[in-house]
Structures are given as structure tokens and as C-alpha cells.
């Protein structure tokens, strides 16, 4: 706070290494909500959280945060599914996305960003974002 810099905390709930090869995110809403609440209590100004397995549960994460919640991207996925999930998470109260691989590993990152910007700034659904992506 002394330097005026926001504190972003990224609480991670991981599956045991014995499940699915290790370093796999656990989308259990109970775990994510608890870790998000703890991050908020530690003074986070912004929280970068994993999506819940069911995007319709993400509003619980947002309610626990008491500050803006950005969704962490994780591994590369089917782009249409990324758009649909992103729109569902925004509808549940996410403030935005912090995506990496689903953008920079794509053959047309500009088009992916255009679709995501429509979801975040224009309240577009996944289908509309997909259409914008295909137009680029």
C-alpha cells in the first residue's frame, strides 16, 4: 500500500498428483471459495481465481472475494468452449480474464482477443464471440 501498487493474489486449488498426472486444477467450488475468501482477508485488491467446474457456481467465488475477480485461463482448450465458458463466467460476476495459452498459442491471437473483448466489454455470448473470431 505504501507504493500504491495493487496486490493480486492467485489462490490455487490443485488435485493430488496421483490424479490425472499432477498439476491439475481442482474446480471444486468449496475449495475455490474458501481460498478466495482467505485471499480477500489477506488484503487482495484483485483475485485471479480458477473457474469452477460448473461455471454457474462462479458467483459464489465472486461473493466471497469482496474485490474484483479475474478468471485464470489454465491450459489450452477448444476455442469455442473457451468463449462459451468465458461468457458464462462473466455472467456470474467475473471482472475479466487473465488468459495466456488460449491466446498466444493460437494461430490468430488477434481474433481470439477480439472475441474475448466482446464478451468482457460488450456482454457478448459465446456464439457472438465465435462469429467475431471467424470474421478476423
Image (cartoon, helix red, strand yellow):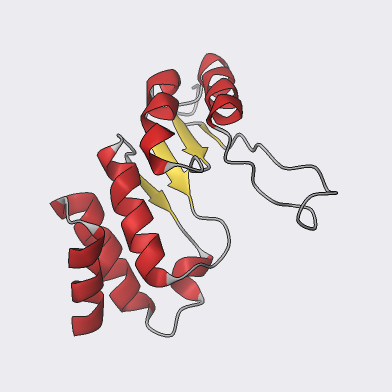
Query: Viewed as shown, does residue 6 lie left or right of 90?
Result: right
Whether 47 is drawn above or below 130: the answer is above
Whether 73 is drawn above or below 16: the answer is below
Judging depth in this view, the residue of 46 and 107 nearest the camera is 107
**Where does residue 19 sit, x and y in percent of width and height?**
79, 50
Q: Residue at x 58, y 18 (%)?
A: 38
Query: Viewed as shown, does residue 132 lie left or right of 15?
Result: left
Task: Quarter of the image for the C terminus: give it.
Answer: bottom left
Query: Viewed as shown, does residue 92 lie left or right of 65?
Result: left
Query: Viewed as shown, does residue 111 lie left or right of 7?
Result: left
Whether 40 is drawn above or below 17: the answer is above
Q: Residue at x 26, y 60 (%)?
A: 126
Instruction: Tell me where residue 45 sits by quadrant.
Output: top left
Instruction: Tell me where residue 61 sits by quadrant.
Output: top left
| Residue 5 seen in this snapshot | no
Q: Residue at x 24, y 51 (%)?
A: 120
Q: Residue at x 51, y 39 (%)?
A: 49
**Where does residue 102 sit, x and y in percent of width and height?**
47, 68
In the image, farthest residue toward the top: 41
Instruction: Tell me where residue 65 sits by quadrant.
Output: top left
Amino acid at each position: 500500500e505504501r507504493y500504491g501498487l495493487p496486490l493480486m493474489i492467485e489462490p490455487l486449488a490443485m488435485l493430488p498428483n496421483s490424479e490425472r498426472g499432477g498439476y491439475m486444477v481442482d474446480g471444486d467450488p468449496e475449495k475455490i471459495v474458501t481460498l478466495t475468501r482467505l485471499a480477500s482477508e489477506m488484503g487482495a485488491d484483485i483475485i485471479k481465481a480458477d473457474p469452477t467446474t460448473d461455471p454457474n457456481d462462479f458467483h459464489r467465488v465472486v461473493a466471497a472475494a469482496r474485490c474484483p475477480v479475474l478468471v485464470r485461463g489454465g491450459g489450452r482448450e477448444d476455442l469455442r468452449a473457451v468463449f462459451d465458458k468465458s461468457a458464462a463466467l462473466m455472467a456470474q460476476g467475473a471482472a475479466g480474464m487473465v488468459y495466456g495459452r488460449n491466446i498466444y498459442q493460437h494461430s490468430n491471437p488477434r481474433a481470439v482477443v477480439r472475441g474475448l473483448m466482446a464478451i468482457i466489454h460488450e456482454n457478448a455470448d459465446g456464439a457472438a464471440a465465435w462469429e467475431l473470431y471467424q470474421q478476423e
